Amino acid sequence: MRIYSILLISVLMAACGSTQQDSKPKDLLSDEVFIAVLTDVQLLEATYKQKILREEDPNAVMPGYYKQVFDKHGVSQDDFEDTFSWWMKRPEEMLEVYNEVIDQLTKLEKEHLEEDQ
């Protein structure tokens, strides 16, 4: 499931590319929900990369963790992936989404630091 990180890199590399202006299909996740799920996905992947999750085989355990994230937000993996794919075709707009994710992560970090004081 490291594919989301790989796709982020693809977005950054393709930022000069496509500028599709078609309207967003109604069956995709709302921007707010998508940003919230993507924020949790980034937290999950960072946790794994920092070896906080000690499982040896990520292919065996990560799908379960992703499912927990999707369940938390009441979305399916298919809905998330469809929405992710739609945004990936709009790299400049996807960068704006990732800026929102970074803002959310920064806010969470600040809250965590305040709790520790």
Image (spheres, rainbow, N blue to C red):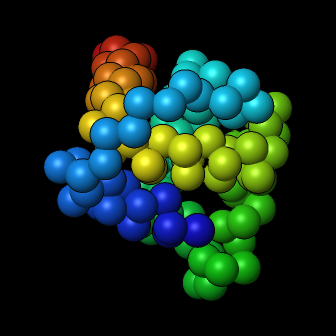
Side of 114 where 84 appears, left or right: right
Q: Position of residue 18 (x, y in %)?
A: 31, 48
Image: 78 above or below 79: below
Screen quadrant of the C terminus: top left
Which corner quadrant of the image does residue 13 belong to?
A: bottom left
The outermost residue toward the bottom is 57
Q: Position of residue 86 (x, y in %)?
A: 55, 44
Q: Using the rendered image of the protein, determine whether residue 88 is visible from the camera's viewpoint.
A: yes
Residue appearing at x 50%, y 68% in the figure: 2
Screen quadrant of the N terminus: bottom right
Q: Position of residue 91 (x, y in %)?
A: 33, 44
Side of 17 where 108 appears, left or right: right
Residue appearing at x 80%, y 45% in the figure: 76
The outermost residue toward the left is 16
Q: Using the rendered image of the protein, determine whether residue 33 is visible from the camera's viewpoint.
A: no
Which corner quadrant of the image does residue 20 belong to?
A: top left
Residue appearing at x 81%, y 32% in the figure: 74
Foreground residue among 39 and 93: 93
Q: Position of residue 100 (x, y in %)?
A: 37, 25
